[in-house]
Amino acid sequence: MSAALELCLSVDLGTGGPKVGLVTLDGEVIASEVHHVTTHHGDDGAATQDANQWWALITEATKRLLGASDISSSRVKAVAVTGQYASTVPVDANGCPTGPCLTWLDTRGGRYSRQALGGMFQGYNARKVLPFIRKSGGAPSTSGADPIGQMLYLMHDQPDVMAATRWFMEPVDYLTMRFSGVASATHASRLAMWMTDNRHLSHYDYDPQLLKMVGLDVSYLPPLRPFGSIVGTVTPSVATELGLSSDTVVITGIPDLHAAALGSGGTNFYDTHLALSTTSWISCPMPKKKTDINHSIASVPGLTNDSYIIINNQETGAKALEWLQEALAGTGAHMSFEAMTTLAATSPPGAHGVIFTPWLAGERSPIGNKKIRAGFSNLSVQTCTADLIRSVMEGVAANSAWLFKYVEKFAGRPLSPIRLLGGGAQSRLWCQMYADTLGCDVVQVSQPLLAQMRGAALLAFMALSERSIDEVSAPASGVTFHPTSGVADLYRARADQLPTLYARDKKWLLKHPQ
């Protein structure tokens, strides 16, 4: 069969739900579906999703895609899964969930994380946290909103779940196991645990000292493998159900951070991408391990087994616009994403003075505060819906600019152009706002919503030796947006206000904000 006809079944499990697609050797997504899932929130800090629902949506979508008359399932040579991380799916020995997924928003394990690592040094015990920084580059959050807090919560408060649980899995590793039947992970997929010695990326072991410090049993953690390696082939039952060949390979799970770099073509050192998805981040590959603990920026295991990639995270990206969409729907204004951004364009830059701070779910970078909350400032009786929408878009971009200056300092150089991807990057208006706010060229990558799906597939073709990382690398290509004179000055001034607004807003915090 001609290599040009070969496909990868690629899954991108975002917080909002899974995207499933068929991707060619050249990275073209020729068919795809997007599905929504609900996050269930509780007053106790719970934020869970149904991992069985993910699998049902993915398998049904796959059958529809492969059932199309012009697509033969025999063309599918690999399966690759990317998506959200810093979440925990407890599963049994067969890879089936024993309870719901605790997402990266779930904070119920915070008290156990604080007992293990809490103290006076930025919320940490300095003596305990330094081994984590030295070895892994970061440390578990004392908020509990990461795998360590989630696992400790399950171990202490969910005995029925624990009795049935064999593995604690990241979502991408869970789905990889559902396809292959093999429990596996990588330094990259487990990066949010901070439990591997990332000074030595060829050592595929969890660090016993770090595990002991938080009281975690290594037997619950799936074996580590090289990033982008082949785990196995699809199981006979999956092959039969989906109509795939029994020799279709499955590769290791891929964090969306890494898939975004691959999907944007930004695989060389300092090729920078910015994800405007449910959350947001700014990242690029770099040659060494490094940590900025003050601003929650680090370099973690990267796109190859001898390199690193910058990690940081802002808890609310394009989710802010989705939140406003849902809020407006309660008033009877049912607007699509396109309708909202079109309406936003009728409000002038600066949104008639309305300012939005986008901390709907707290923040991680460049400040760590799970309790800070979002807000509108400078509203007037003349403020209209267009102003509110535009101010939300401008506020998210300003928040990225606040982080961007620390990322450039971390990288030790100016970073330009910026490759913009994710659902929010489908809006040209938002792309232009980013160029003006960051003060540099921004490139809207091809198929921005599907870029991570493309990246996962390209890594699968690399595992099959049909692509190399040099072939995946590409100059920033797509529609380029340049800073606009005058508007850029306004937006930079707005971004410079954020630290002051943060200092003001944190004084208003309720003891237990929702």
Image (spheres, rainbow, N blue to C red):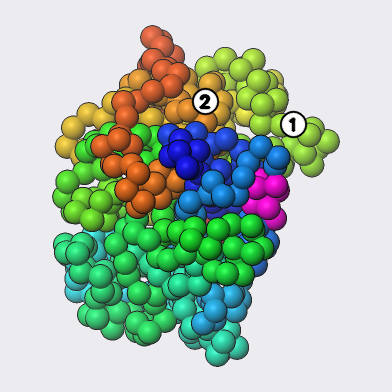
Q: Which residue is mark 2?
A: 430
Quarter the C terminus occupies: bottom right
Tell me which segment is drawn in magenta.
Answer: 60-67
Q: Locate residue 193, reporting x and y percent.
A: 36, 67
Mark 1 Cα within 10 Å, few/some/many (few <14, many 20+)? some
**Which quarter of the picture shows residue 164?**
bottom right
Dominant SS type (magenta): helix
Where does label 1 land, which residue?
A: 335
In-front residue for pair 39/51:
51
Residue at left offset 42%, top offset 17%? 481
> Residue 158's spot in the image, x, y percent?
57, 84
Residue depicted at x 65% and y 20%: 342
Along the horizontal axis of the image, is 432 left or right of 514? Answer: left
Which kind of residue does numbered mark 1 sit on?
A: Met
Type of amino acid at the residue the image marks with label 2: Trp
Drawn side of residue 232 relative to residue 108, left or right: left
